[in-house]
Image (cartoon, rainbow, N blue to C red):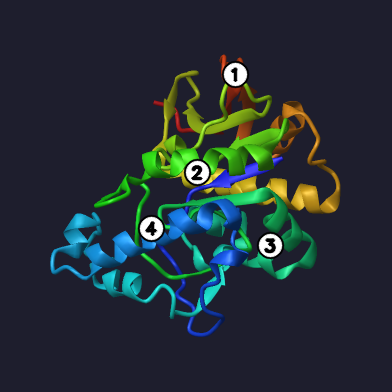
Amino acid sequence: MLILLPPSEGKTSPVSGPTLDLASLLGAEALSDPRREVMSALARVSARSDASSLLGLGPRSAGDVALNLVLEQAACAPAHALFTGVLYDAAGMALLGADPATRRVLGGHVVIMSGVWGALRATDSVPDHRLSMATSLEGPGRLASFWRPWLTPVLEGLAGDGIVVDCRSGAYSPAWQPTPARTATLLRVSVVVERADGSRSAVSHHVKHTRGLLTGALVRALAAGTLSPDDDVEAVVRVAGGLEAVRGAELGLADRAGRRDLVLVLAGAAR
């Protein structure tokens, strides 16, 4: 079982720690060279006076461009501790990373997508940085397209013929999708609100929080042994349906690539 997460714009910048070791990151043998290529292109852009505009950074992040110039010298922290925000808070990442049993699950089953490094184990240590997968850099080009051929063998090797619980946001999904020839089943997690009159609507402001709750529940279940890495999709649905905030969990039909929708239904106010 593999759980795919997006990164977060919000980060807790480490004040101390080891420096970046590309050889220690997920898929280092295949991904170190493209990581260096992206890091170099990012440094060139970040040295420009219009860097914040080119990188699509908002007012709160524009001042952090300089972080991209010291990636190899800056202190690093595990990705599960570096990234903050709604999804990571809802998952309880601080507690998951502090407990040895759940930390092992984070290292073996949780992968965080990254514009700079392509994909990371949740326990991989990296420095603070600013780069979205939606960005296009001179040289690598559009990052989702750049990373796709590099990530495909790495992530398909990790996924095998198991379940991939996809909690990624839109910009990160194109960087890897299981190919139709593979036997992995990708569950795309979506969230809807169901009102008293039966009508439903997608709710973007609940999506990150609910995906975070699901991530935390899956990690804890894997650590406790109540969920096996080899379990089928119905086991994931049962965990999702047991979340306190979720009224129900529904599974869509598989498409030709083996992808299915896992729809988490929240209760909403009547109209």
Query: Circle 1 sits on which residue?
Result: 252
Query: Circle 3 sits on which residue?
Result: 96
Question: Real-space Cα distance between discs 1 and 2?
Answer: 29 Å
Question: Real-space Cα distance between discs 3 and 1?
Answer: 30 Å
**For residue 104, which quarter of the picture?**
bottom right
Query: Circle 2 sits on which residue?
Result: 150
Question: Real-space Cα distance between discs 2 and 4?
Answer: 12 Å
Residue under the image location 68 percent in, 62 percent down:
96
Is disc 2 surrounded by few (<14), some (14 to 19) or many (20+) residues within 10 Å?
some
Between discs 1 and 2, the one toward the N terminus: 2
Question: Real-space Cα distance between discs 3 and 4?
Answer: 32 Å
Camera-near label (3 vs 2) is: 2
The picture places residue 42, in percent across and down from the top left corner, at 31, 62
Query: Circle 4 sits on which residue?
Result: 37
Q: Is residue 245 visible in the rendered structure shown here?
A: no
Q: Nearest the camera: 213 or 228?
A: 228
Q: Are marks 1 and 4 in contact (CB under 8 Å)?
A: no
Q: Quadrant of the C terminus?
A: top left
The picture places residue 20, in percent across and down from the top left corner, at 51, 73
Q: Secondary structure at mark 3?
A: helix
Type of the residue with mark 4: Glu
Residue under the image location 55 percent in, 73 percent down:
77
Q: Is residue 46 visible in the rendered structure shown here?
A: yes
Residue furthest out toward the bottom? 16
Question: Real-space Cα distance between discs 3 and 2?
Answer: 29 Å
**For residue 107, which quarter of the picture?**
bottom right
Between discs 3 and 1, the one toward the N terminus: 3
Q: Nearest the camera: 237 or 228?
A: 228
Camera-near label (3 vs 4) is: 4
Is disc 4 surrounded by few (<14), some (14 to 19) or many (20+) residues within 10 Å?
some
Left or right: 173 with respect to 93?
Answer: left
